[in-house]
Image (cartoon, rainbow, N blue to C red):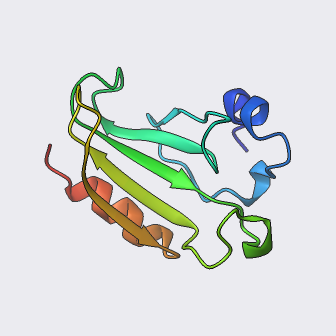
């Protein structure tokens, strides 16, 4: 199992063994100011141009800040202005992977 040190620092109570398979090339972008761990999944990994930002919440809904929210989300960000140009939320990891794969900045 791959471990993510940045995630461990930002979210020490997050059990990384509950993560779905993270595709190679994704960058751990977890930040303690967010409500859950995240990855830059596609696009500009410097976050200056368009990028896809994937959030993975706790497996157990009661551990989430918003227990009724979906476990996974991808936000498509248009780059330098940091404005979201779209968002998908789902409990289906395959749907998130497909959205990232088919995203065109």
| For residue 63, side relative to residue 48 (left or right) | right
Q: Is residue 81 left or right of residue 1?
A: left
> What's the residue at 45%, 61% (across, down)?
73
Give the vertical position of 6 relative to 11 (above or below): above
Identify the residue shown where x is 71% and y is 61%.
58
Q: Please tell me in which quadrant of the rendered image residue 80 appears.
A: top left
User: As drawn, which residue projects farthest toward the left?
Assistant: 104
Image quadrant in which the N terminus is located? top right
For the point 20% across and 39% down, the residue is 78
Count of numbered marks? 0
Instruction: Name the residue rendered at 33%, 26% in the picture.
Output: 47
Please determine whether, in this image, residue 10 is positioned above or below residue 68: above
Report the side of 3 relative to 86 (left or right). Answer: right
Q: Position of residue 33 (x, y in %)?
A: 63, 37
Residue 7: image location, x then y, percent: 69, 36
Position in image of residue 89 (x %, y %): 42, 69
Q: Is residue 66 or residue 75 the one in the foreground? A: 66
Q: Nearer the viewer, residue 91 or 68?
A: 68
Q: Position of residue 62 (x, y in %)?
A: 79, 73
When the figure is inspected, residue 48 is found, relative to residue 8, above or below; the finding is above
The quadrant where residue 37 appears = top right
Left or right: residue 3 versus residue 55 is right
Q: Which residue, as the protein is rendered here, is positioned at the far right?
A: 13
Quarter of the image with the C terminus is: top left
> Between 22 and 47, which is closer to the camera in this rendering?
47
């Amino acid at each position: 199992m791959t471990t993510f040190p940045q995630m461990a620092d930002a979210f020490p109570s997050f059990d990384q063994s509950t993560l779905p398979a993270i595709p190679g090339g994704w960058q751990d972008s977890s930040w303690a100011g967010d409500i859950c761990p995240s990855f830059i999944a596609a696009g500009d990994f410097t976050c200056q141009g368009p990028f896809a930002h994937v959030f993975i919440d706790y497996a157990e809904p009661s551990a989430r800040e918003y227990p009724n929210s979906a476990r996974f989300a991808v936000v498509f960000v248009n780059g330098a202005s940091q404005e979201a140009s779209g968002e998908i939320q789902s409990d289906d990891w395959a749907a998130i992977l497909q959205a990232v794969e088919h995203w065109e900045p």
